[in-house]
Image (cartoon, coloured by chain):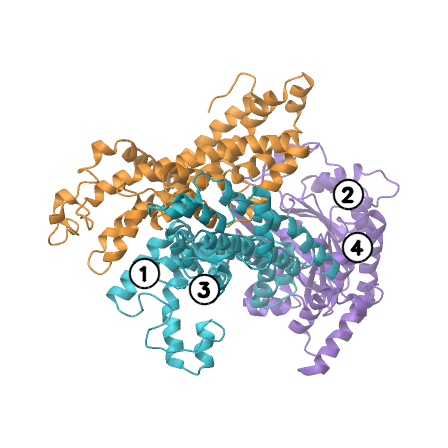
Amino acid sequence: MTMTADTPVASESIFRRNLSNFAANRLAMACALIVVLFAVMAVFAPWIAPHDPNETDLFRRLQPPAWIAGGEWSFLLGCDALGRDILSRIIYGARISIFIGLAVIFVATTVGILAGLAAGYLRGWVDILISRLVDILLGFPYLIFAIGLMAMMGPGLWNIILALAYKEWVIPARVVRGETLVTRELEYVEAARALGASRWHIMLREILPNVLSPVIVVATIRMAHVIILEASLSFLGLGVQPPTASWGSMVSDGRAFILEAWWVSTFPGLAILLLVLAINVTSQGLRDAFDPRFSE
Amino acid sequence: MSLSKLLERIAQLLPVLLGVSVIVFVMMALTPGDPVQIMIGDQSITPEQEAELRRGLGLDRPMIERFFIFLGNAVQFDFGESFYHRRPVGDVIAERLPATIELSLVALIVALVTAIPLGVLAAIRKNSIFDRIATVGSLLGVSLPGFWFGILLLMLFAVHLHILPVSGRIGFDAEVRMVTGFLLIDTLLAGNLRAFGDALAHLILPAITLGLPMTAILMRVTRTSMLEVLRQDYVTFADAKGLSRRRVLFRHALKNALIPTVSVAAIETGSLLGGNMIVETVFGWPGLGRLVVESIFLRNYPLVQAAVLFYAVTYVLLNFIADLLYTVLNPRVKL
Amino acid sequence: MKDALLEVRGLRTVFETRAGRVCAVDGVDVEVRRGECLGIVGESGSGKSVTFSSVMGLVKSPGHIESGTVVFDGRDLRGLTPREMRAVRGRDIAMTMQDALTALNPALTVGEQIAEVLEAHDETLPARGAARRTAIRNTSVEMLGLVGIPSAETRLKQYPHEFSGGMRQRIMIAIALACRPKLLIADEPTTALDVTIQAQVLELISDIRARLGMSVALITHDLGVVAEHCDRVMVMYAGQVVEEGPTAEVIGAPKHPYTQGLLASIPRPGLRGQPIHPIEGQVPDLIGLPPQCRFYSRCAHRRDACLTPVEMRQAGPQRRARCILIGEDEA
């Protein structure tokens, strides 16, 4: 994050102190490292993956993992029904999960911050409008909302991002609105107002830096949710379309073979669990470090 | 709570329900992608047939008019015709509903009866080994993708151990006359204990899969609120009165600690609805969730719209119930 | 002493905190005689509440009693099992807390909260059935009447939030007194109340004490309250007793510089209702205290001799104080 010169110095040093609090939490740091490893895996997938994720080989149909009779060490986690290397598909699948996760959170957080700032700072009809919309969107079960949208828009990468972001922005918006309502009454904001700063200047330069900590914490927690939601959509066949590898659809592919090839479903699911768990622990660490009020 | 306050609350509910209907309508009407095109898919079709289809769906009329028609029909539970089933959408939904409700209720019960004792125990033995295991367990519970966990359970209990059935609500050999639609009740009404056991066996894995995230969340909530309550003066005062430990824990502490648990449970019951689609798909459960997923692939557009609206309305009502429960349980909050 | 109802000797209660061991109560002796009202005065953190939580066996984790004896009515309370201790609490020794709003359970009616003490302890009740319910109800109504709550019958069904602050305090007292305890520990009974109600509640406690013949340990930081209601007074500072004796004597001629400071900070006429104006300086940090007079850093009379441990000294027939000046007075 960047801090401008007219930001109160205190908020920057608090942010630093928060970060060092976080660094002291070993479990959370280890999990943050796992998240980073997944990200590296996603970015460098072509270099890391041992095989082409979409290369089929019917001679290797449902080949078991390396340590089971019939397996090969060059196909560590075995192959799926089309003889594709599961490990390579998991590595490429990380791209989909992480890209969609980041994209949804980025879009939702940006929209949420703007909406929350506007509602909390401008108040009046803007607040009423945004808050009503937030209430109504909260009236939908998330997955059903996303499924409904996907059903209408048809599958595809950008449609998933849109379908999830449609509702996701509500969450940062609520957080930012609440924090803004408090922050707008603080002295330095009053001072900026008295000096004749424009509304957008006050919202973006004075208030925003002070509401960022909770937004970051919420964004990481939500990232885990979004990854599970994306995997769920893919599992139902409403996500990224084949042959693109995505963890959810890989688990779904394996369903037909649970009798004879447990590895097809198991490993991609394990990847989801590991990434989501690591993100959850990291975000809990962030929350404890950034906001002692929440820690038990 | 007085009747007039209750009516006032219900009145406040109406704008949200209206808003939800608007969103469902707009969502279906405005999202990129033409439902008619999606329904047609790659079938060849003449422009006349396409226009006919459009007229059949009422898509040729102005948006506002379509909304009011939609709303008027929805209130009467009339959602048009399901092409695939060649029956009214409302009937198809109503037929599938009991299976979904039965599964959700059992999952809810499973979650409540495991989460509350575990949460209380974790709070009482704070920082013990048990508490740590429970904390890790609840973190796992919210991080597990439900569809994958369901498949793992299937592989273990149905495929390898052969102790539980793979899919469906009941074995094919069982003939049970549907009265309520809830198999656990209908089999008992028929006096068929074997079928009851069979229906119960079919319920176990789906209910666990569906209830797991909720169990994790409720356990966490119960633990946190119990810890909070145990710090309160009234617990110390109850101890100072020389009451038995059980009475202090259950009557004084738990009664207050459960207030947040119950309202979170009601809200989370709403997310069970979403989980249903996944779990019903994994376990071949013939409920509304699977119907919706199937309908999406059959491009059964009116049914999907109706089901989404139905889910959303149920969700809003559950949140409303959560609110009411909170008030009823907490004498301090005056409506 | 023969007429002692409660006798505490050498009580040490420590809290294991992240910052270190906090010795909240350090070698405290307390004696409450039958029928008397003992005032316990001190600033917050002086250990006065923890002392009596220890007596009740209600010290919460991370605190625990390290050593000392607590003898009540001839029984060693620290030797009792938890179950036996619960039978003592509420029946023989009762306690009221600072703020009735938080001490009464918001989710239970006032009637339930009185009834359960009777259920737990009152052996004179009929064994079961309607007779038992009626007896409990009658006693509950009687108790509310005793503390001056009108139309008790109907108010039993109400929840604590439906009462005013003063009323709640009375209800808490009624609950504490329901089993006619021999000792009432009243922890800051008036701090949460406004001044006029304070007087009423204190009068009520004094009045009931006289009628029931019980003893009262009145924990307060208000010397005015002590002057008006207590037979004897005990002053605590930083986990230790620094002075004790008959109220009139202690207030008339305090021996310990801390007590002197407390009294000096109150304008003479009308002691009541005056908060203690803190003496210059601060209460020492209870972690890692050096073995010296704890008041040393704030004392006007300090000298090198104060840097060694100071014991309680006899300062009159019924008076003791923890100060090296006392021997010198006599010399």
Per the image, the residue denoted by label 4 is: C164
Is residue C65 visible in the rendered image? The answer is: no
Amino acid found under the numbered disc labelled 3: Arg
Per the image, the residue denoted by label 2 is: C254
The kind of secondary structure element at disc 1 is helix
Kindly check if marks 1 and 4 are in contact, taking CB atoms under 8 A apart as contact. Answer: no
Amino acid found under the numbered disc labelled 2: Pro
Mark number for residue C141? none
- Mark 3 vs mark 1, CA separation in Å: 25 Å
Amino acid found under the numbered disc labelled 1: Leu
Letter of the chain in purple:
C
Letter of the chain in cyan:
B
Q: Report whether mark 4 lies on the same chain as mark 2.
A: yes
Per the image, the residue denoted by label 1 is: B153
Q: Colour of chain A?
A: orange
Q: Residue at x 70, y 70 (%)?
A: C115
**Classed neighbour count for the residue bearing mark 2: other residues with Cα under 10 Å, few (<14), some (14–19), many (≥20):** many
Image quadrant where residue B207 sits? bottom left
